[in-house]
Structure formats: C-alpha cells, structure tokens
Amino acid sequence: MKGGQKVYVCFSSDFLIEEADPWREECWQMIKERKDLEFIFLTKRLERLMDVVPEDWGDGYDNVTIGVSVENQTRANQRLSLLQQLPIKHKNIICQPLIEEVTINDYLDDVELVVAGGEYHRNARPLNYDWILKVREEAITRNIPFEFRQCGTHFIKDGNDYKLTYRQLFSQAKKADINWYPSK
C-alpha cells in the first residue's frame, strides 16, 4: 500500500470489541510500522480503549483517528464525554445511525470531523432531516468539517415520510449538498 492513504480498520465492525483482543496487538504493530498511513477506526466501546492500547500510546499515535458513534443523546453524553477525557490525537464524532435529535456542542473540543446519517434496513428507525441540520449547524459554528453520508431507509424531510432504497441513501444525502468544510 502506498503511503499517504487512509486505512479503515474494522469498518463494518468495532476495533474495540472483545473478540478482537486475540489479534489486536498484531494490528497495533502494523499501525506502528506504517506511520505513513492514516488509520481510522470507529467504535461504540471507547471505555475499553485504555485497556487495549499499546504501552507506548502516550497521548495517541499521530497516524490514528478514532471516530466515536452516537445514536441518541444518552449515548452522546456517555461516549463523547469519554472522548474528551481520553488521550486521542485525532477525534471524529459519528452521529450514525442517528435515531433522535442530539446536541453535541459541549463535546466538540479537539474534534476534527462530524459525520451524520441514518440507518438502513427494513425496520429502520426514522431519521429526521432537521436533526441532521442541527448537528451540521453545531459543527459549522465551531468551524469543524461536516459530512452527511447517508439518509435513512425511513427518512423524514419537510414533514414528508420517505422510504428509501439502499442506493437512494447515498444519492439523496449527496443531493442535499450540505457537506461543509472550512475555507483554508
């Protein structure tokens, strides 16, 4: 793999799950060896981080970004307060699958990216577009990049209730054209 690329670790799972304990050390070794790559992983289990990082973690590795996913305000309060306390150099907040309105403004210190989106499956809980816009506004107010990655299968916008297919989740989010990046 060429240097400068992003590597998504356990992207359809969680790097901090207990089942990864047997092989995680080998992964950390690869991350240390490839300082020329940016490793990104998402987790809902941030409380396990300090139990599984290498001894030389210090205040985090320069080439590791940790994204913490939150789906509602209770989880946002739990996980994001922990995100603020832990030694992590690169922090992202992933509001996905967002299943209720959340306020993340109190947790945006040192955050480099905010992502939002809905969930996909037949019985998906509703995603209200107003919730996405609220999170976006909080990110913009703090000059933090924002990405709306996908709608939800059950999507509410302007009082209308939509049922979207898998392909529409991404195309409709892109069509909304609300991703935001600070000008340099």
Image (cartoon, rainbow, N blue to C red):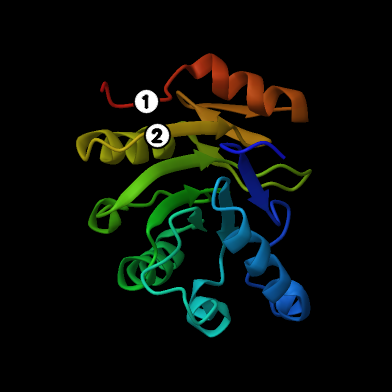
Residue 167 falls in image quadrant: top right
Q: Position of residue 56 (x, y in %)?
A: 47, 77
What amino acid is at disc 1? Trp
- Residue at point 31% right, 66% down? 84
115 or 22, which lies in front? Answer: 22
Residue 27 falls in image quadrant: bottom right
Q: Position of residue 18 (x, y in %)?
A: 70, 80
Q: Position of residue 126 (x, y in %)?
A: 58, 43
Q: How many marks?
A: 2
Q: Which mark is residue 146?
A: 2
- Residue at point 79% right, 43% down? 122
State the CA–CA distance, disc 1 to disc 2: 5 Å
What amino acid is at disc 2? Phe
Q: Is residue 117 visible?
A: yes
Residue on which disc 1 sits? 180
Which quarter of the rendering shows the C terminus? top left
Q: Is residue 15 visible?
A: no
- Residue at point 21% right, 40% down? 142
Which quarter of the rendering shows the N terminus? top right
Instruction: State left or right for residue 152 relative to residue 121.
Output: left
Q: Position of residue 82 (x, y in %)?
A: 37, 72
Q: Is residue 44 above or below residue 62?
A: below
Q: Is residue 177 above or below residue 20?
A: above
